[in-house]
Image: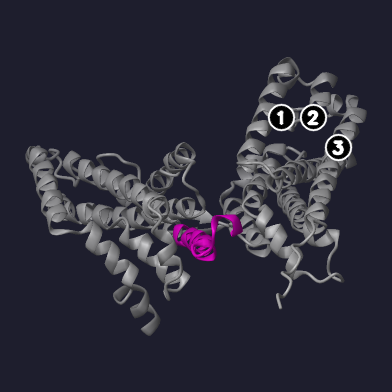
Amino acid sequence: MSGLNALFLKNPELRRNFRIELSPKRLVTAAIITGVFALIVLPSLTQRRPASGSPYITLYLMAILWSQGITLTLGGAISCWRAVRRERELNTFDYQRITRLSPLELAIGKLFGAPALAYFVTLCLVPPAVVSAAGSGGVAVDFLARSYVLLFTGALVIHAFALMISTISDKGGMSSGLLLLMLFQLVPVIGLLFSASPTTSVQNAGRTSALPFYGIAFPPTFLWSALELSFVAWLMLAVVRNIKLGLEAMQLFSVWEGLGFAAYCNFVWIGFYPWRTASRGNAVVASELLLFAVAFFYAVGIGVLRSRELVRRGLREVTAALFGSARWLGPIGSFAVAAALTEIVIIIVQAQYSPWESGASAARSLFLVLYFAAWMARDLFYLQWMKIRPVRSSLGKAFLYLGVFYLSTSIVFRSALTSTNVDAAFAACLVPFPLLRQWTEAQWNAAGGMWLLALGAQIGAAAVFAYLYWQEVVGLGSQPKAAPLARVG
């Protein structure tokens, strides 16, 4: 209890944000605006009930819920996104970094303090929502309670994600941050769809069926809110890890944390995937599933990349006996191995519902496992090499060049990427898009040699970028150190 008391009741950062966001003038203004809004849509309360007398959800209640959702998710996310970034622009964040506050206390203070006004506006709209639900019947009250649970947990995920973006962002990058925040607004919407359809029928909402997860039926609200809270924990781990570090020393996750987060993301979607209905007797493992699994390791792997300053510090800390290529090439290699193991798990799971008809299907599945793992390693080694190069905005330029590469390849091989011939197989030497096409067994075997060439190209490119990255590390380690000052007198 003492730990929770220090985190919430006696947290100086939380109190400071409350004083800023919940000033009397702001509270009065917000209360007046929300009261006027509630009165404007009040006439919908008088709409006629169905003749059958069955309970129903009023349009007024739905309007209030969507208004609360927009206010708390979007408004709170913008506040959290500006929490660290704004103070860094004003050159006041360094003072917070040197205080005696722990990283967790600082992160909690910003997570719940920055969107305090959004929470207050949401609370102001609770009374009219409760009145409307109570007038519609007990099922509407149950629907309202489940909606509020999903709204709160979904907002926490978005706020934690926004705070993480704010923590690792410098004074630039506004457009990218806003884009990511807009994409993340899908979280509460998906949660609401899992709980109940946004219809005006309370009966449909009350009869929401259980949600299967690894074959076990869970109440949708419980399952979705539990998963959202687990993602909050992962995101807050990244915030706590970096919030008191300088931008040049930040690393979103450690290698083991990144592997754990990527594996957990795959654990979640594998549990939801309808293996029985999706296999449809197909003996070939769908490449889309394997690429989807690798995509999580790809995305999280970007957050594990080391900056130039981190490499320098690592070189100073490591003794000569421990200095070797495994220390620097191992993290991306471990991500490639973990991705391959996850793909093998997916193959085994699907094989339970779609037995292989021939050894050719097993060989094709093995190729897909190796290809996607090598492709991910190629891109991550390229991004890591670019990130430690002595240029400004190195990682941003790396993403720009990578985007141009994929776009130009798609344009040049446009006809090949939409067909299933040898030319399309050749395009797999550069990009994985041809593997997302539906290849028959005969077409796949006809391009057998080209598939081996594509796999070799991915492995070769990954080795080249790994070598370039290693050369940069060696160059940083061989830079002459400043000579000590000579003693005078």
Camera-nearest residue between 340 and 279 = 340
What residue is pinned by disc 3?
Answer: 455
The range drawn in magenta is 226-249
Mark 3–mark 1 contact, CB under 8 Å? no
Q: Is residue 375 above or below residue 117?
A: above
Q: From what the image shows, is residue 193 above or below residue 450?
A: below
Instruction: Tell me the SS state at disc 1.
Output: helix
The numbered mark at residue 433 is 1
Depth check: 230 or 283 in front? 230
The residue sitting at the front extreme is 489
Is 366 drawn above or below residue 325 in the view shown? above
The crowd level at tag 3 (other Cα within 10 Å; few <14, some 14-19, many 20+) is many
Residue 433 placed where, x, y %?
Answer: 71, 29
Instruction: Estimate the spatial distance between the alpha carbons at disc 3 and disc 1, rounded to whole Å.
Output: 14 Å
**Mark 3 / mark 1, whichever is N-terminal:** 1
Which amino acid, mark 3?
Leu
Q: Residue at x 45, y 73 (%)?
A: 102
Looking at the rendering, in which quadrant would you find the N terminus? Answer: bottom left
- Our reading of the magenta stretch's main secondary structure is helix
Secondary element under disc 2, as helix, strand or loop, is loop
Residue at 76%, 55% in the rendered image: 341
Contact? badges 1 and 2 (CB < 8 Å): yes
Reply yes or no: does residue 38 show up in magenta. no
* Residue that label 2 marks: 428
Left or right for 295, reference 354: left
Give x and y (percent) for residue 86. 38, 50
